[in-house]
Amino acid sequence: MIAAQSRTNTDPSLDSIRDAVVAGDRLTLEQGDALYRTSDIWTVIELADLVRRRLHGRAGYYNVNRHLNYSNVCALSCSFCEFRRSKDEGGAYTRDLDYVRQQAIEAVELGATEMHIVGGLHPYLPWSYYPEMVSAIREVAPTLHIKAFTAVEVVHLAKIAKVYKSADRQAGIRWVLSELKQAGLGSLPGGGAEVFDDRVHDAAYKGKIRSDVWLDVHLVAHELGLNTNATILYGHVDQRRERLVHMEILRRAQDQALARMGYAGEAQGFTEPGLAATTGLSAPVITLTRPGSMLPTPEMAQQTAGYFQTITPLPFFPDGSPLEALPGPTGLENLRTLAIARLMLDNFPHVKAFWIMQTLAMAQLMLQSGADDIDGTVVWYDITKVGGAGTHQETTAWQLTQAIREAGFEPIERDTLYRPVTRDGSQWSLAETATPA
Ligand code: V47
């Protein structure tokens, strides 16, 4: 990292933002705008790195996992998506439970701690398929953490289980998540959030749930003690300000989750005008990035309620999608958006650079720009295929640790809940040691 004093092109208009970041104060949307506007991207990155190091020191997290896409058949047709197929289209697939079991057994044999499962909104699979899939994995692989189903799928499941009523949608969502939790679901991934904005929604993923419903699913998951993640899929028809509002909505939702866990906050008033009224999100401001703040732990979540662990900024990858005429975001825009996510989302413990969508080389730069995690070994991934990759997109734990070390950080294998793992080949257990500062 280039020290600010030794650079000649620093932007003095960022000085007050630097002061706020050093003090751990919450940044406003206007300050977010300034971080997007400035040509002094190194200061943006430097500030994000400061926050990242304050929270995680030299730790660079990764996990040994396996992604499973159980079906690419989807009733929706989002224009950013290259993955979805109609039921009878060439290349459409739906995995049976024997296939899923086999994947879980293989994952355990290779030492995975997590299975990350998502799929399309299948128009004909019955509700029973989903809890049976989770139970089947639990049976053959009891040590595997099952992180499954985006909020979009959860709402679809409530509909096919005929428990979804728009007058009380949380009740149907609660029923579905309780059933899945009982079957062995461990947490929810962060997909399907896209950009929380009605204009962008109607232009690029009309038909998908809107932000209020996405937030309801995560709120109910948190109330049930399930941790969840969040994403932002940017760089298509969205504008930078809309991304910042998305981040503001997420941090207000996290304020609520942390308040439920017993964190005390400060009554700071600022928010996007009209935001609290439209989202119903009002809670005291709770930051985790002040010096000395304590991050929530999985143990706290088990005793009280869940929270958002991670934000994963997902750059739009155009190839093969109906929006493929768009260029997609540049490398610098990716670094900037990641750094801004780290700075704005002051109550999210982790920021993930998902190497599959960024390449491992770019993920190294992202570790220096605010990210503390690069996801895992993945093995199989169908949603995006960057640089002409096929569905077999695997890296080894060794490659991940080398990449993290070369970026200047200490590789820490974690489980899904960010507990350090100790490993001997494919055998692993949760480490008792604290992470290095
Ligand atoms: O929900 C789809 C996005 C998501 C494209 O929670 C695209 O730990 C870019 O959510 N270009 C799935 N993005 C991936 C996801 C995820 C990945 C890794 C970790 C976690 C986590 C979550 O990918 C989808 C959608 O938002 N997506 N198509 C595309 N063309």
Image (cartoon, rainbow, N blue to C red):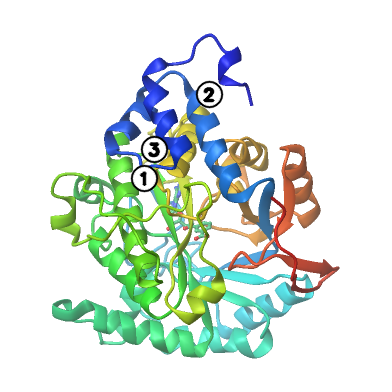
Residue 292, position as x, y percentages in the image: 53, 51
Q: Residue at x 51, y 33 (%)?
A: 47
- Tell me: residue 166, above or below residue 150: below
Residue 110 versus residue 96: which sits nearer the camera?
A: 110
Which residue is under mark 1? Answer: 322
Disc number lying in front (1 or 3): 3
Which residue is disc 2 drawn over? 42
The local crowd at label 2, few if under 14, some if 14 to 19, many if 20 or more residues have their Cα within 10 Å, is many
Label 1–label 3 contact, CB within 8 A? no
Q: Residue furthest right?
A: 424
Amino acid type, mark 3: Gly
Res 89 seen here: yes
Is the CB of the residue bearing disc 2 within 8 angstroms of ligand 1? no
User: Which residue is tagged 3?
Assistant: 235
Q: Secondary structure at mark 2?
A: helix
- Locate residue 102, reporting x and y percent: 68, 80
Q: Position of residue 133 (x, y in %)?
A: 53, 84
If you read the primary sequence from the N terminus, does the residue marked by circle 1 or circle 3 appear first?
3
Which image quadrant for residue 156?
A: bottom left
Q: Secondary structure at mark 3?
A: loop
Where is the N terminus found, in terms of image quarters? Answer: top right
Q: Secondary structure at mark 1?
A: loop
* Residue type of the residue flagged with mark 1: Pro
> In the image, 298: left or right of 265?
right
Q: Amino acid at mark 2?
A: Trp
Q: Earlier in the sequence, mark 2 or mark 1?
A: 2
Task: Using the rendered view, name the quadrant where residue 216 is placed.
Answer: bottom left
